[in-house]
Amino acid sequence: FFKQKTAYEISTRDWSSDVCSSDLEKHAEKLIVALDLDSAPEARSVVSELKGTVGAFKVGLQLFTGGGRELVRDLVESGVRVFLDLKFHDIPNTVASAAVEAARLGVWMFNVHAFGGGEMMRRTSDSVREFCSSSSTQAPIMLAVTVLTSWDQENIREIGVTENLSEQILRLARLTKDSGFDGVVASAHEVSSIRGAVGDGFTVLTPGIRPSFATKDDQKRVMTPAEAVRAGSDYIVVGRPVLNAPDRARAVEAILGELAGI
């Protein structure tokens, strides 16, 4: 029945009467809300609205530049799971050192660009695990971005990559696993082939998610929440469809409603 209602018509009574709370919690764990905002006060307001209803919050370049390290630390200390989405890409020593600082902050998850290469990822993985072992802290989930979901075949050809887009993604996924990382950031369109290439026990996080009530914006390889999870995504990231909604909590409920219909 969720497909017959708009995002803002789905009430708490609607979905809670048809879906048990344990199922809702399971779906909520998969949902990460992107805090693609300009300032720490804006981010804190959104977190205050949605804390406890979603699995985690993503802090990317925009907010990290505007809100900084202290915001991330405060969110972590308040019990919020933070996905630090800075897509590190530099020489191996620099990325490894930055990743250790991310682990020191206590983030739940962070990412790098797989285009940085195997040495960069291996050095990063080893450094983070060594730091977490010596400090008796939980190691964050380490992911590598394969190809941005705003890119298509023409974009990778523009930078000199002549390989087919799908093959390039699989090559980077294999390299990521061989380098000791926990998983990749990839479009839901590639999840099945990635799992076939690298096997089970490999995390796939999917950005560029657009619920049935939302527009695609600047994303190209997109899916709805239900389509992505059905395809095998472990986590999905939703930004503007929640942030720009008149009622953010209701937008989250609508997304969980879509997932409950799987």
Image (spheres, rainbow, N blue to C red):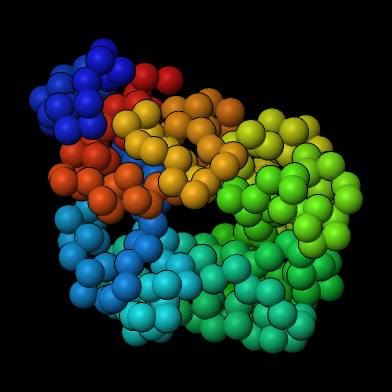
Could you say where residue 124 lies in the image, as x and y percent from the top left? 71, 74
- Horizontal and vertical percent position of residue 199: 76, 38
Give the total of numbered labels: 0
The reply to whether residue 195 is in sight is no
Is residue 6 or residue 186 the one in the foreground? 6
**Quarter of image, res 226:** top left
Task: State left or right for residue 83 relative to residue 183.
Answer: left
Q: Nearer the viewer, residue 207 or 14?
A: 207
Quadrant, the N terminus: top left
Q: Is residue 140 above or below residue 50?
A: below
User: Which residue does the image show at 88% across and 47% down from the upper left?
Assistant: 163
- State the residue at coordinates (60%, 83%): 98
Q: Is residue 231 visible?
A: yes
Q: Is residue 118 left or right of residue 30?
A: right
Q: Residue at x 32, y 67 (%)?
A: 37
Residue 153 left/right relative to 21: right
- Furthest-right residue in this view: 162
Q: Residue at x 59, y 32 (%)?
A: 232
Q: In the rendered view of the protein, which quadrant contains the C terminus?
A: top left
What x and y, as percent, mark residue 85? 51, 66
**Which corner quadrant of the image does residue 117 belong to?**
bottom right
Q: Is residue 69 above or below residue 178?
A: below
- Horizontal and vertical percent position of residue 53: 25, 46
